[in-house]
Image (spheres, rainbow, N blue to C red):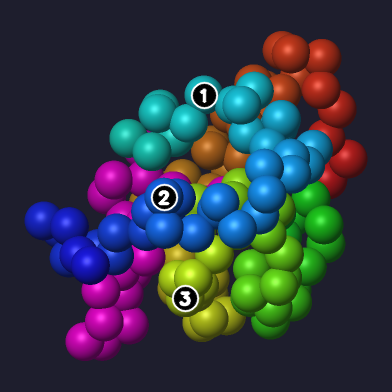
Amino acid sequence: MRDAMGRRRIGQERFGFAVDGGKQSSLDELAKLIEWMPIDRSLSVISCAARGEPAWPPLSLFKAMLLSIWNDLSDVKLAEALDDRTSFRRFSGFSVPEPTPERTAFVRFRKALVAHGLDKILFEQITGQLKAKAMRVNR
């Protein structure tokens, strides 16, 4: 499915997360601590789709990038982890049955973040939010 901007619509939880049995992870708790709306608004200028494909939602890509930083994952390993780990899928906004981005989506997204001057600003906002709630981020 696509939205008005030609982006994929993901995270239809009613179609997938019930399979998980309600098991929560530390990422679920962490996601609740972060105020995502300002980040999402800042990311609204980014659309980095491959030619002929709908773009992935920028906030989902950003959340996945956070996971890659916090877990020291390459783009290839991040794509594999999103396919394999339910907690990573939930944190990033993907339901169980839907596809997840391939590694090149993260390369395009990172370039777009830098091009719009959002890379350091948004990561600092997340770090600041977590520090304000006495959470420590190692990376």
For the point 47% across and 75% down, the residue is: 99
Q: Nearer the viewer, mark 3 or mark 1?
A: 3
Residue designated by label 2: 14
The answer to whether residue 89 is above or below residue 26 is: below
Crowd band around label 2 with a 10 angstrom C-alpha radius: few (<14), some (14–19), many (20+): few
Q: Quadrant of residue 39?
A: top left
Q: Position of residue 71 (x, y in %)?
A: 82, 57
Labels 2 & 3 near each other (Cβ < 8 A): no
Front position in the image: 84 or 14: 14
Task: Indicate whether 36 appears above or below 116.
Answer: above
- Look at discs 1 and 2 and give the one toward the viewer: 2
Give the structural element (helix, strand or loop) at label 1: loop
Label placed on residue 99: 3
Q: Which residue is mark 1?
A: 35
Cα separation, mark 1 vs mark 2, equals: 23 Å
Give the residue at the far bottom of this rendering.
52
Q: Which residues are magenta?
A: 42-65
Q: What separation in Å lies between label 2 and label 3 (alpha carbons)?
A: 16 Å
Residue 49 colored in magenta in the image: yes
Task: In this rendered view, identify the residue nearer to me: 115 or 47.
Answer: 47
Q: Secondary structure at mark 2?
A: helix
Which comes sooner in the sequence, label 1 or label 2? Answer: 2
Label 1 neighbour load within 10 Å: few <14, some 14-19, many 20+: few
